[in-house]
Amino acid sequence: MSSSVVSVSHISKHFGNLIAVDDVSFDVVPQSTTALLGGNGAGKTTTLSMLLGLLLPTAGSISVFGVDMLRDRYRVLPRLNFSSPYVDLPRRLTVRENLTVYARLYGIIDIGARINALSEELQIGRFLKRPYGQLSAGEKTRVVLAKALLNEPELLLLDEPTASLDPDTADYVRGMLEAYRKRTGTTMLLASHNMSEVERLCDDVIMLRAGKLVDRGTPGQLLARYGRRNMEEVFIDIARERRLELAPDDQQAAKP
Amino acid sequence: MSVIAREHTGFVPSLRRVYALVLRHTYLLRSSGPRILELVYWPTVQMILWGFITVFLVGHSTWIAQASGVLLSGVLLWDVLFRSQLGVSLVFMEEMWSRNLGHLFVSPLRPFELGCALITMSLIRTLIGVGGAALIAIPLFQYSIFSLGLPLLAFFTNLIVMGWAIGLLVSGIVLRYGLGAESMAWIAIFAVQPISGVYYPIETLPVWLQYVAAILPSSHVFEGMRSVLFDHTFRVDLLLHAVLLNVAYLAAGFVSFLAFFKVARVRGQLLHVGE
């Protein structure tokens, strides 16, 4: 049995002539936070969608908790959850109604207690009775995160968790995710453009460019490998296909 | 301790998850008076229109005079078919309009359970809409469709099941082709209306079209309705035809919805819902 929470083996996704993801393989170890990094169109959201089973790969295999996601995803879905700025919640339902519906879908035992605990943790109590559609972007992000945490997922997939948030709210969300991981040991996989977020939250970074996995390492390893001071500069180097000549040891470490 | 209950992961649909989705649409319905009013509005307008046509024709048509409720029964039963199809399709499109499909299908909800929730909501919406119109017809035209007795239950059941089947097919098409195809939800069912014999006997149709009518459950239902109204006879043969056809229709509806769902997973349409 695999010790990885997520094991992705040679997945590709083609949309007609467009190759969105090209022969990507990686593992995610338990209780880690892994970032999928890359520019627009690098294949981050496509990869996440395939991990969630929302999108079927053209080739390759994906297992989560040792279960084949292409065959048996319903065995695994109760143990994971996700949030994305591209997926909304029903706008006319209040926040409490939305959370109640999803709590029932996930089979939460004590729905009221769970919603109260999350509303305290994410500070959403004051707008539980308001329709979701009337909330600000920051409030919506917190509600979607509450939905993503309803089932205390062992694997949390986050697509751009702080996109379109002001710096204060984004910092709050990052702090909350950090604390949550420390408390529960949840494994996280997040797609992001935000380099400070990646440096703060992630212990493993997977770099994608044009659908291919082009580099991988801890933020510290990547900074050293590219001779840069921050991940933003590393990101630009990779996006523009610049890289230092590596020593043999580093070349080995950099292999995807 | 886990916050979630242990549950089977087999093929049997989970009533809890079906109920969760029914609850989601009940919240939506009860939060909006105009939505409830709209459910009753069109069936009532149709009923009033055909009620007055009946009042006029009773004095001018011996056929109508024999069974004055034939047009009103026809329009109310037709609305059962139309509203049940629309109920499935609209409830599904609500999920697309609210860009909620991604969250739904990452939850343990299965497509088949979504289908079960859609048909449950369709039943609720149809009972509110057509039930309201049927009740208004009693004081307005002194006609109660409930006077059909037990056969009404058979007619209602067959028409609502046929509506579910077409609704599931339309929902699959909208999922596959995007919200640009949403007008299908309003127009698709009208393709079968002229062939169903809602307001006239099937023998009125050209012979070749009568063969087409024979494969529609609705045509057997409306023939059966006229048999009850004119001859005071419940035609079991027509009921059996309708039931057998509906079993095939409903299976085809679910299969097509699941097939379109699979295509949507291949094409990435669950996350990026649009035109």
Image: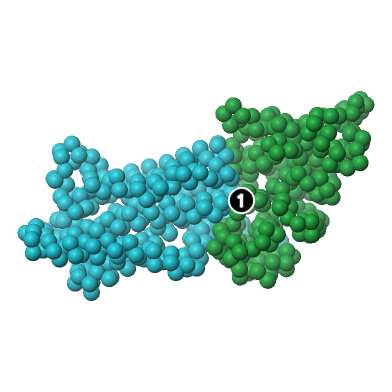
Q: In what element is the residue under mark 1?
A: loop
Q: Position of residue A249 (x, y in %)?
A: 92, 28
Disc 1: CA contacts within 10 A as few (<14), some (14-19) or many (>=20): many
Q: Residue at x 13, y 64 (%)?
A: B56
Residue pointed to by mark 1: A87
Q: Of all residues shown, which one is farthest toward the bottom?
A: B139
Q: Residue at x 70, y 32 (%)?
A: A211
Hue of chain A? green
Which chain's residue wears label 1? A
Name above or below for residue A116 compared with residue A254. below
Which one is in front, A132 or B270?
A: A132
**Is there any visible trace of residue A71 in the rendered image?**
no
Q: How many marks?
A: 1
Look at the image and tell me in which quarter the N terminus of chain B lies.
Answer: bottom right
Name above or below for residue A74 compared with residue B72. above
Which chain is assigned cyan? Answer: B
Which one is in front, B35 or B239?
A: B35
Name above or below for residue A212 compared with residue A156. above
Q: Position of residue A173 (x, y in %)?
A: 76, 57
Q: Residue at x 31, y 62 (%)?
A: B43
Which one is in front, A208 or B124?
A: A208
**Is there any visible trace of residue B86 in the rendered image?**
yes
Q: Position of residue A76 (x, y in %)?
A: 63, 47
